Image (spheres, rainbow, N blue to C red):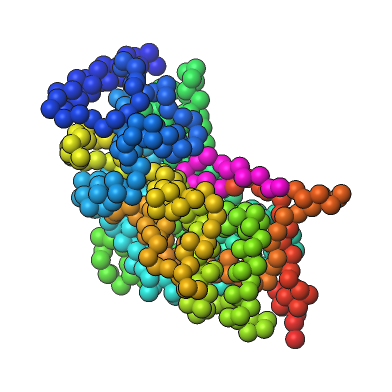
Amino acid sequence: MIYFALLATTAIIFLSFFRKYRTSKNLPLPPGPKGWPLIGNLLDMPSQSEWITYHKWSKELGTDILYLNVAGTRIIVLDTIEAATDLLEKRSVIYSGRTRLIMCNELMGWDFAFGFMNYGETWRHRRRIVSEQFNTVAVQQFYPKLLTATRGLLKDMLQNSNDVIGNLRHLAADTIFSVVYGLDVKMEGRESLEAAKEANHAMLIAGIPGRFLVDYIPLLRFVPEWVPGAKFQKLARGWKEATLKMIEMPFLTSKAKVDDGTAATSVLAHSIAKMQEGANPAIFTHENIKAATGTIFTAGSDTTVSCLASCILALVHNPHVVAKAQKELDGALSVGQLPDFSDEDSLPYITAIVKETLRWRDVAPIAIPHRLDADDVYRGYHLPKGSMVIGNSWAILHDEKIYPDPFKFNPDRFIKDGKFDKSVPDPELSCFGFGRRICPGRHLAYSAVWIAVASLLTVFDIKKVADKDGRIIEPGEEYDSALVCTPLPFPCSITPRSEKWSAIIRGDSD
């Protein structure tokens, strides 16, 4: 059967090439690396850190619009903010689709997540449930939950500062379970959390198109898992079980609390109340609410961990940034006072640190690709309908024309005359996606990171660690190469700035 699938796919590829040359005979395609007959650039595709290779090709070819053909799958990479804005923002009506992620959506069960869903009515309904709760005003109702989770992080760091990534994962789980479901992760979410770890890990691998050949050759999805070379089918089956458990269990637990009147404030509780009131019956259905809350649950966990871990890594390498931040905090806060969201305007350097982290080590270097839903022409190039369109956020956020010395962690690039400089392009315009597909949870994510960074720097010294002989251990800068990139565990020293702060964190101060 696998040979039949490959033969049929070859025929489809041939027809796609024929159609490509027929429809674009008067206009060239954007530049791209020269491919092979039939398979195109299939053998050229990188297996990790795709964004770096895309940028390298763009530089070599002198273009910010790169074209690839991978076994018939057309890929357009936008390497600058100008190209991304012109197409993904200004022409969003035809650039807001999603490419067909066969491994992730059709085999692993992630078709519930509106982030992977094609533009349309169901997508609008599920996104509406989220955006209604996470706009700049509504998100403030969750500030107390963010503060509680952050105080928990401080205690975890005090008790065990050696497990930085583990502590950050605990923070993310506390935040998401409380905000989305109104649940205590320690008491009501352990099993769901374990399923989420497996499902999210799988999604971060499979969410990048091309990690599995079935994304390029759709007919392979019909190949049984016992056929040699079809190991992906067995992986998908196991991952799908974890995915379904991840979205089902916390939903049922939280809904039961809503039904018996014991539910805390949460996205789910609000949405169920709207459903029971009969508001927008097409939007507020059990299926949409479960899918929407499941999407937030999965999207919020790893992104928060990635950003905060990158920030701590940057602070370890830049002690002068730590010193400057602590001077600002000490001057703005009363003695023994932990920061609150009301302090944000008086802490511009903390804001600059967060913005620089989002730029320096962007969480999702190429995010989730868009799909072009109609033939288009741009700068004299023919852009074919059905193309996968990738905004290379990594390249945009490391453009030396916008951010001089882009690989240096430098929060001062956002500071002018002691104030936050709003004239510098905001990294949030690129790191959270583009156009109609921009992340609706970005305001919550930013707030969660900001208060965590402010709190950590208020009470802890963050620096490099020394070995038993007193020699400084340089932390590595290795990252997972996935849809969301997180630093691998690294050594560092996180210690209370004073015994007074230790007592405050423990809650036993005067």
Q: Is residue 467 visible?
A: yes
Count the marks: 0
Residue 195 drawn in magenta: no
Residue 107, horizontal then vertical, whole percent: 41, 35
The relative height of residue 142 versus residue 27 in the rendered view (above or below) is: below
Residue 421, horizontal then vertical, whole percent: 43, 68
Residue pictured at 31% horizontal, 61% vertical: 128
The relative height of residue 174 versus residue 437 in the rendered view (above or below) is: below
Which residue range is magenta in the image?
A: 474-486
Residue pictured at 34% horizontal, 31% vertical: 61
Residue pictured at 25% horizontal, 17% vertical: 14
The relative height of residue 172 versus residue 80 in the rendered view (above or below) is: below
Q: Quadrant of residue 502?
A: bottom right
Q: In this view of the protein, which residue sits in the foreground, 91 or 260?
A: 91
Q: In this view of the protein, which residue sits in the foreground, 33 or 212?
A: 33
Residue 485 drawn in magenta: yes
